[in-house]
Image (cartoon, rainbow, N blue to C red):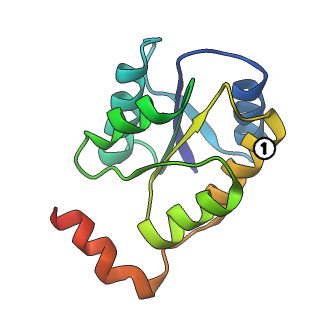
């Protein structure tokens, strides 16, 4: 898969996520050279919505800012996740296409588990199709 990626800081958590992504054979695309979280979220969102990437991963201190910025892009459903169950549910029940995480509050191994759960959930739950379509209509 091609993953649009952006973070407004670098630390052990961001390095672990990037290493996991490349180690799994994903092509990691830096969506922007900016270190400002609004730019990062928007650039990753545009890459996903524009078809340049299959999914996006954004990281900032809380994950919230990059998620909000990504969600401003039509066609993006960015979800803030802090544990694998939340990430898996975001894919299953919301068809999220951008994962947002805190680079300050998640330990590297947990961030990798969250990322894996998000990307390993290949398809949305068909029972949620009507609700997911309603998101697109908003």
Instruction: Give whichever of 7, 55 is nearer the camera.
Output: 7
Dividing the picture into quadrants, the one containing residue 17 is top right
User: Quick check: 130 left or right of 126?
Assistant: left
User: Quick check: 72 left or right of 121?
Assistant: left
Location of residue 6 in the rendering, given as x and y in whole percent from the top left corner: 52, 27
Dividing the picture into quadrants, the one containing residue 136 is bottom left
Furthest-right residue in this view: 109
Disc 1 on helix, strand or loop?
Answer: helix
Location of residue 91 in the rendering, given as x and y in whole percent from the top left corner: 52, 64
Residue drawn at x 26%, y 74% as measured from the top left? 133
Q: Residues within 10 Å of mark 1 (few under 14, many from 20)?
A: some
Residue drawn at x 61%, y 67% as measured from the top left? 121
User: Quick check: 69 left or right of 40?
Assistant: left
Is residue 112 placed above or below 125 in the rendered structure? Answer: above
Furthest-left residue in this view: 137
Location of residue 38 in the rendering, given as x and y in whole percent from the top left corner: 35, 22
Dividing the picture into quadrants, the one containing residue 39 is top left
Quarter of the C terminus within the rendering: bottom left
Furthest-bottom residue in this view: 127
Q: Which residue is mark 1?
A: 110
Residue drawn at x 29%, y 82% as measured from the top left? 130
Location of residue 77 in the rendering, given as x and y in whole percent from the top left corner: 37, 53
Is residue 127 placed above or below 70 in the rendered structure? Answer: below
Mark count: 1
Is residue 103 placed above or below 93 in the rendered structure? Answer: above
């Amino acid at each position: 898969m091609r993953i649009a990626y952006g973070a407004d800081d670098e630390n052990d958590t961001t390095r672990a996520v990037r290493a996991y992504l490349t180690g799994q054979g994903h092509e990691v695309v830096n969506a922007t050279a900016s270190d400002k979280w609004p730019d990062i979220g928007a650039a990753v969102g545009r890459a996903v919505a524009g078809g340049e990437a299959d999914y996006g991963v954004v990281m900032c201190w809380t994950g919230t800012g990059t998620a909000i910025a990504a969600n401003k892009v039509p066609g993006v459903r960015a979800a803030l996740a802090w544990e694998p169950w939340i990430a898996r549910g975001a894919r299953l029940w919301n068809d999220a296409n951008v994962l947002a995480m805190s680079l300050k509050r998640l330990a590297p191994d947990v961030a990798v588990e969250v990322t894996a759960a998000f990307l390993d959930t290949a398809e949305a739950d068909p029972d949620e199709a009507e609700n997911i379509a309603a998101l697109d209509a908003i």
